[in-house]
Amino acid sequence: MKANNIFVRIIKDRVFKGAAVVFSVLSILPLLFILLYIVKNGIAVINWQFLTELPKPVGEIGGGIANALVGTGILILIACLFSIPLGVAAGIYLSEHRTGKLAYAVRLSAEVLHGIPSIVIGIIAYIWLVVPMGMFSALSGGIALGIMMLPVIVRTTEETLKLVPGTLKEAALALGVPYYKTILKVILPAGLSGVLTGILLSIARIAGETAPLLFTAFGSPFMDVNILKPVNSMPLLIFNYATSPYPEWHALAWGASFVLVVFVLTLNILAKVISRK
Amino acid sequence: MKSQVVRVESFSASFGEHRILKNINLSIPKDKVTAIMGPSGCGKTTLIRCMNRMHELIPDAQVTGKMFLYDEDIYSMNPILVRRKVGMVFQRPNPFPTMSIYDNVIAGYKLNGIKLPKTEQDSIVEDALRKSALWDEVKDALHRKGTFLSGGQQQRLCIARTLAMKPEVLLLDEPTSALDPKATSHIEELIVELKKSVTIILVTHNIAQAARVSDFTAFLYLGELVEFGPSKKLFTVPEDKRTEEYLTGKFG
């Protein structure tokens, strides 16, 4: 082979490797810019008052996001109460029954549910819950978010429990432990970190959802812990303030965005730490 | 007390179309070590799994014939009770990874929801660990995770966990196949020691191991019980030609 030819090849190799590095760096940039921008605009607004006070009417100075923080907390709690038992149980069923018609149907519907646009889930919750109950409520919003969490929890639970060695199940059964206790006290604890990771990631997924809440939790300027009343939430507050014509409200929206991003980032990091154990 | 613990009568087992065991008749003597040996795939593991009904985990498993634990029909008992009386140790050590050494030993009680006073638990754990010759090595580390132990220690921990339930019969399914020679000899010494208090059925594909530790030996070939008798006799003057060929390494 000619020396010249080899030289060209080496150049091509270097260009290819260089391009891979450049594009990898480029793919980090969007996140970096978003974070920088949010920190720059949001951090100035954050203080104790911002976190603990209710929103004030237009024209008054100050005001906080306390009701949105509490509202998001309530919504996440309802979503978890609805989706964790259902999702973990379905995940256990799938890992125990790898084949079969029901397992196929559950697996398929989890996949399809994962792909349904969040606005559609909001509309469904509106038709099923808001219309019959006659009012917007935290309950309907929480359930809409819970439906969005469900497929993530089902799949992560299934995948984690499949990795638990079958010999552990045999060990427990051979000690005369009933099947349900084998699952609950041996298999599930062995895969606990994976299941928890899935739950945290699914919370991170829904914490910033706005669309399913538009016709369910609706939003509210008051502090309300009654789950049958409308509540405010972080993404709704950001949406309402950011689309308003008042610059003071824009600043509050940046502050709220900052808080929300920090919350979601923390969940993601926590999930990483737990899954490493 | 009867001298026969487990009695197998014209017993056959199959998985789907596949017949694994063909018309087995066998009586396991009390407080002795009975080895079940034979080449891979001859059905030895299936035979002992049928004794504590662990084969039922496989969906299309079917059995015909009878098995008795003393005078009770194993197949009309509740499988959970069968498994408490007929303990099992597996090929690969499988301590519960989320539990400490102590909790692993007492796991059979805890997981079954049997509440015992702390002092009684302590004595069960110590007794089981002493019987499995692990006590001296772990007595200062009872609250460490069982998975920190070496392979051989883990296997003895699994034996302790099974002994803690005070079973009538201890089934050992090739308990040394995943262990090094030193750990293997440890387990073999343990087996000889244990037969004073519990009936042991040992599955092995290792002829030398069967000869070293067993009082009786059953030779299984292609799902049939070819020969069963005192190990001394079976290893020196086998009756069946197939046993002799297996022992001399002509197949297997």
Image: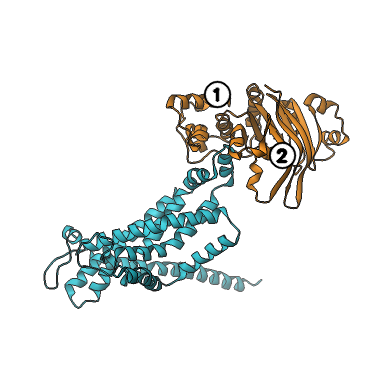
Supply the letter of whichever chain is orange: B
Residue at mark 2: chain: B
Residue at image mark 2: B47
Q: Which amino acid does label 2 sit on?
A: Leu
Q: Is residue B89 above or below residue A35?
A: above
Position of the N terminus of chain B by quadrant: top right
Kindly report the distance in space between the C-alpha atoms of the residues bearing marks 1 and 2. 29 Å
What percent of the width, then of the height, locates residue A4? 60, 73
Secondary-structure class at tag 2: helix
Q: Look at the numbered disc 1 and give the secondary structure of its residue.
A: helix
- Chain A colour is cyan
**Closer to the camera: disc 1 or disc 2?**
2
Q: In the image, A36: left or right of B126?
A: left
Residue A3 shows in the view: yes
Q: In which quarter of the image is residue B250?
A: top right
Same chain for marks 1 and 2?
Answer: yes
